[in-house]
Amino acid sequence: MVRMRSTIAILIALIALVIYSNWLVHHVTQTMVLQLEEIQIACNSQNYKEGTAKIKELREYYKSKEHLLALFIKRDYLGSVGVSIWGLSAYSQQENLQDLNSEINKTKAQLMVIEHLFFSML
Amino acid sequence: MIVLILRTLIVYLLIIVAMRLMGKRQLGQLQPSELVSTILISNLASISIESQELPLSASIVPVFLIVALELCISAICLQFPKVAQLISGTPIAVIRDGVIDQKALRELRFSASDLLEALRSKDIFDPQEVSYALIETNGTISVCKLHQKDLPTREDLNIALEGTEKPMVPFIVDGKVLVKNLCWCKKSTNWVFKILEREHLTLKQTLILLGNETETYQIIKKAVSNENSSETAL
């Protein structure tokens, strides 16, 4: 009977963990993709100051969520996303606009890969 | 390096919890489903120890899912014998009245030498001595010898029992009183303390106290140094 109770407890804990991890990964990646799009819009409309502020905001957000994501996602992937985000502010100026767009698209792709690897079954 | 040590420690402790949850059956002869879960758990445990880039949850979640499934399957098998039959199979008779059932052996993919080896492990060198032999679901052999070839019992030889039927069981091990054993032998802790008083010993000084429902007992004192040890038997 004790073992059955333990089994139920384990299953409930696992289900809770699955729900939380699904929500966390989806929520964080989607929020970051939105933030990246906002940076792209701001910089493409020559508003580099706002763009730089949004990049800082994105960095802070990622920093606050990275340790939670590390519970479920391989650290290699998180590391490469971190490196891409940290490098963005260097491109938020007129002469590097093309590079910025390219870096933002790369970061978005990395986030999509994380989401895909987490949710895909096969 | 400290992370590796911590991860190993966490995985080690969690696997101990997992194995304890699965119970003693997991440590002895394994049924097919138990063997599968043991192999999977051992592999999963090693993944997060050797690959530090992987999150711990990559091992812990599947391990505990396997434990939960294993416990569920054993509970279902207990409730529904047909499911148990489906998962673990059924014991198969391979010898009846000294005659080897060759068809059953072929079905089990057991060669004659496998059977002889299994019989030898039971101290039987001639299959004709066997009345009934079964290959159990965990792959071990259970043998019932022909009565005329089996060892006689006290009952067969009409030898009366002297004293007790119970073996000597431990009442104290390493200074700790085993109350369940005392109850089984209809003894109380007072009896134990009386014995210790008679022997001029304290609980801490006692390594083992063996006894049964009679007044016979055996005490082994704890060694004071590495060389000193004494034994008293009454």
Image (tube, coloured by chain):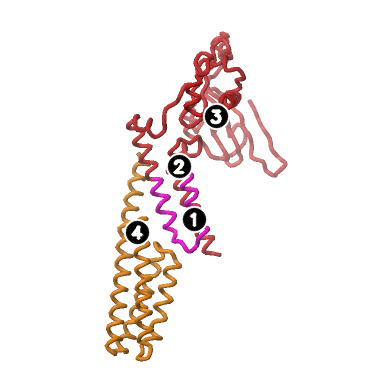
Chain colours: A orange, B red
Question: Residue placed at 64% from the left, 40% from the top?
Answer: B222
Question: Which secondary structure lies at badge 3?
Answer: strand
Q: Do the residues labelled 1 and 2 touch (CB within 8 Å)?
A: no
Residues marked 1 and 3 touching at CB (< 8 Å): no
Question: Left or right of B137: which side holds A21?
Answer: left
Which residue is denoted by mark 1 in the rendering? Answer: B47
| Image x and y of residue B181, in percent | 49, 31
Q: What residue type is labelled 3?
A: Val
Q: Mark 2 lies on which chain?
A: B
Residue assigned mark 2: B36
Instruction: Look at the numbered disc 4 and give the secondary structure of its residue.
Output: loop
| Disc number for residue A44 | none
Crowd class of label 4 (few under 14; some 14 to 19; many from 20; radius 10 Å): few
Image disc number at residue B169: 3
Secondary structure found at label 1: helix
Residue at the spot of label 4: A120
Question: Same chain for the residues at labels 2 and 4, yes or no?
Answer: no
Q: Of label 1 and label 2, which has the lower sequence position?
A: 2
